Image: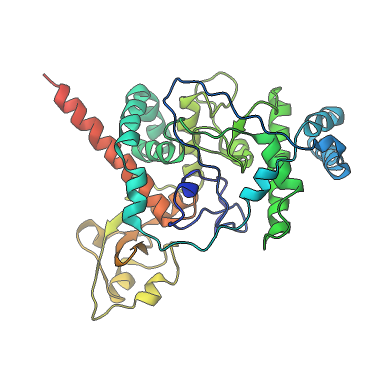
Amino acid sequence: MLPVRLLSFAFLLLPLAAPAQLPPPAGEELVAAAKGARPAGRAKKPPQRSGPPYAEREDAMRFAEDVAARRDIDPEWARGMLGQAQNLAVVSRLMQPPPAAQPKNWAVYRSRFIDPVRIRAGVRFWEEHRRTLETVEQQYGVPAEIIVGIVGVETIYGQQMGDFRILDALATLAFDFPASHPRAAERSQYFRGELEQFLAFHYTAKSSPLKPRGSYAGAWGMPQFMPSSLARWGVDQDGDKKVDLANSPDDVIASVANYFKGYGWNTGMPTHYPVQLDQEKLQLDALLAPDILPTFSAASFQAKGAVLEGPALEHKGPLALIELQNGADPPTYVAGTENFYVITRYNWSSYYAMAVIELGREVKEALARQQTAGTP
């Protein structure tokens, strides 16, 4: 399982879908907070949340000194900043394992992301940032529609980026991750790493770690990057000497493309192909055993009863049988390529990846129809 550096808003909206992945080793149920969308341009004062300050905690202050030593940071700055973080009980509660999942239903899941609100917002986003999308697609090889799909699924193009102070969220999860969680020690260690990245980023950038707001898991900006993703994949596309994923769509577009390129995006490769199942030869358990990891050649795929046609027959790379359950109705199946798998590095779920793909496609088609209608 490859590491994933992001946490998605998408899955708190949808308890019936496969959950999100936490960076290594795994964290399927960990997701960022989902907020109701509000009209763009209308400011909303963030809620006031408070709790005991970490300045009173010896373990937190010792951590600040260790980070300062490792990262060549002024220890007084590190202690002063982390000391202003507050332990938010609501964040710890939100990290408790979710209740038993409802039956997965791709049709319902899809309807919550592929809707007129997101499509219209996606068309506006594409129109406003067409030049950057074209430039970035040429530079990184990642299609504009995939980038547009990600930003739309994650935050409806910046309309719902979260309103928790990130410093509070990360500190709470680093030092007070709920002990009842089955992976509490592992998760706490992960969030300590993210907190260190967050402090180091702001110290180097000479910016305040007290200001950024995002999800209760510490994800930030239009694409919901965690601090380690920001450090590794963030791109200053607009040339203002900083990476701003909350206010610079240019930086957002390039950073998402850089993320996918870093995880092995293959330029020109489809994300998936149609597939039919030959019930007489079907070895469904064997086909589903690798889950979303592409494993089968086109020939071995078909030998196990997954029938391909057209361009899929010429596909040279490995394939995976992607199963999207539809509640009591028969599942939907597609043949996922390595590029489908790359999308799941953003969020470990085939439902999420397909929503990104289909939202991007719907936005692209809506934009084309709009342009055609406006042609004299």
Q: Is residue 269 visible?
A: no
Q: Is residue 154 above or below residue 250?
A: below
Q: Pick out the residue farthest to the left.
A: 376
> Observer-nearest residue: 299 or 275?
275
Instruction: Decide: is 78 above or below 288.
Output: above
Q: Is residue 72 left or right of residue 130?
A: right
Which residue is situated farthest in the bottom direction here? 280
Q: Position of residue 351 (x, y in %)?
A: 40, 54
The picture quadrant where one finds residue 303 is bottom left
Residue 173 as seen in the image, left or right of residue 375: right
Query: Is 275 situated above or below 223?
Result: below
Residue at coordinates 31% horizontally, 46% vertically from top-left? 358
Q: Quadrant of the N terminus?
A: bottom right
| Residue 92 appearing in the image | yes
Residue 332: percent from left, percent from top: 29, 62
Point 67% across, 59% down: residue? 181
Residue 196 x %, y %: 73, 40
Residue toward you, 79 or 133: 79
Residue 118 place in picture, x, y as percent: 35, 35
Depth order, front residue of 46/6: 46
Q: Quadrant of the C terminus?
A: top left
Q: Write the residue at 86% across / 28% down.
A: 76
Q: How many marks?
A: 0
Q: How is the image coloured?
A: rainbow
The quarter of the picture where residue 116 lies is top left
Q: Nearer the viewer, residue 110 or 281?
A: 110
